Amino acid sequence: DEFVPAALAGLDYIGTVAFAASGTLVAGAAGMDVLGCSLVGTITSLGGGTVRDLLLGRTPVFWFRAPQYLLICLGTALTTFYAADALEGEAAQEALWWGDTLGIGAFSVVGAQAAAAAGMSAKGRRE
């Protein structure tokens, strides 16, 4: 069924946007400028998958093989930085919460698939 991979990819992108936005908002609240916010937002969003790929010996890491993730993060960070005032309402915070929730679920599935593809067992050892 082609819907499942497409749905998972969609949730993965939603999580990427949500994590980049939340990292950018936290950095902005700490007083960082646009460069600092973009860097923190991007690291927040791509950091976990980067560590996963490095631990599994998968190089180049995923965002080198699929640069749209980096572009999504940078675009989200810039948009979030300049629209931060509009993201302070309850509806925006709930949308961010749902994005984070769906994203962490998608990231968990993608991570488990990557580990299985690398030959890791449930016990954390290569089979």
Image (spheres, helix red, strand yellow):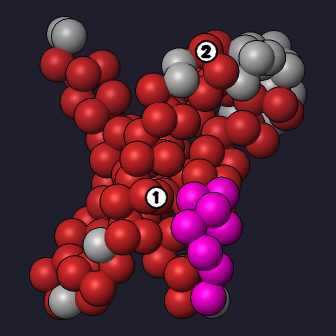
Label 1's element? Answer: helix
Comparing 53 with 67, the one in front is 67
Mark 1: few/some/many CA within 10 Å (<14, 14-19, 20+): many
CA gap, disc 1 and disc 2: 21 Å
Residue at horizontal 81 percent and vertical 26 percent from the top: 56
Q: Label 1: which residue?
A: 77
Residue 23: give x, y in percent of width and height: 54, 69
Is 98 on the left-hand or right-hand side of 46? left
Amino acid type for the residue under numbered disc 1: Ala
Comparing 115 with 94, the one in front is 94
* Visible residue check, residue 14: yes
Q: Which residues are magenta?
A: 31-39
**Who comes first in sequence, dot 1 or dot 2?**
2
* Visible residue check, residue 103: no
Amino acid type for the residue under numbered disc 2: Arg
Is 1 on the left-hand or right-hand side of 119? left
Label 2's element? Answer: helix
Residue at horizontal 29 percent and vertical 73 percent from the top: 83
Residue at horizontal 85 percent and vertical 33 percent from the top: 55
Comparing 126 with 54, the one in front is 54
Comparing 50 with 112, the one in front is 50
Q: Is residue 65 above or below residue 42?
A: above
Residue 35, quarter of picture? bottom right
Residue 85, quarter of picture? bottom left
Residue 64: give x, y in percent of width and height: 65, 21
Screen quadrant of the C terminus: top right
Q: Label 2: which residue?
A: 65
Q: Is residue 19 above or below residue 84?
A: above
Secondary structure predominantly adopted by residues drawn in magenta? helix
